[in-house]
Image (tube, rainbow, N blue to C red):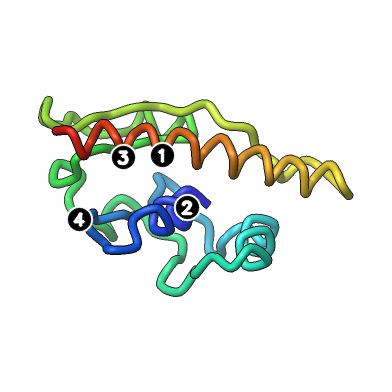
């Protein structure tokens, strides 16, 4: 979800944006996919990737983790790389209308954080 939101906030593709994990799944979360597709997000090119399937982490301006295990397993990175862990809610445990609301809350939280991060990165 974060990758799709970030890409939508950078339509000119001025930044390299990737999403990856320590132990990526084999498919994107179906609830997140459904939520984003209903709202017109372009998910082409998105998939589950591991750390080794993207640029070397030291080449990114910022690394954001949303899962604690990812944060603790990050390698040592140069001080120029901004590293943050964002505690986010996991909507997968909700059902019915609560599930849709949980995805909406996650979307809103991520969008706000990404907008703030982009503002900081653009100033650097």
For the residue pair 70 and 117, the one nearer the viewer reads as 117
Where, by quadrant of the figure, is residue 70 drawn? top left
* Apparent side of residue 93 relative to residue 97 in the rendered image (left or right): left
Instruction: Count neighbours of disc 1 (C-alpha within 10 A) and say few if under 14, some if 14 to 19, many if 20 or more.
Output: some
**Image height check: is 47 above or below 19?**
below
- Measured in 3D between alpha carbons, the distance from the residue under mark 2 to the one under mark 4, in whole angstroms, is 20 Å
Check disc 3 and report the residue beneath it.
118
For the residue pair 101 and 28, the one nearer the viewer reads as 101
Of the two numbered discs 2 and 3 on the same chain, state the one appearing first in sequence.
2
User: Is the Cβ of the residue at disc 2 closer than 8 Å to that at disc 3?
Assistant: no
Check disc 4 and report the residue beneath it.
55
**Mark on residue 5?**
2
Of the two numbered discs 1 and 2 on the same chain, state the one appearing first in sequence.
2
**Image height check: is 58 above or below 25?**
above
Helix, strand or loop at label 1? It is helix
Of the two numbered discs 1 and 4 on the same chain, state the one appearing first in sequence.
4
User: Is the Cβ of the residue at disc 3 closer than 8 Å to that at disc 1?
Assistant: yes
- Residue visible at 26% across and 57% down in the picture: 54
- Residue visible at 14% across and 41% down in the picture: 58
**Mark on residue 23?**
none
């Amino acid at each position: 979800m974060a990758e799709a939101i970030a890409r939508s906030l950078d339509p000119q593709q001025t930044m390299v944006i990737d999403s990856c994990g320590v132990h990526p799944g084999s498919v994107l979360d179906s609830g997140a996919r459904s939520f984003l597709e209903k709202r017109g997000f372009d998910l082409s090119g998105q998939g589950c990737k591991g750390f080794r399937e993207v640029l070397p982490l030291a080449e990114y301006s910022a690394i954001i983790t949303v899962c604690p295990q990812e944060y603790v397993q990050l390698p040592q990175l140069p001080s120029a790389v901004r590293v943050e862990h964002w505690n986010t809610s996991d909507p997968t445990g909700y059902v019915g209308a609560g599930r849709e609301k949980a995805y909406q809350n996650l979307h809103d939280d991520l969008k706000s954080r990404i907008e703030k991060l982009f503002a900081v990165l653009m100033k650097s």
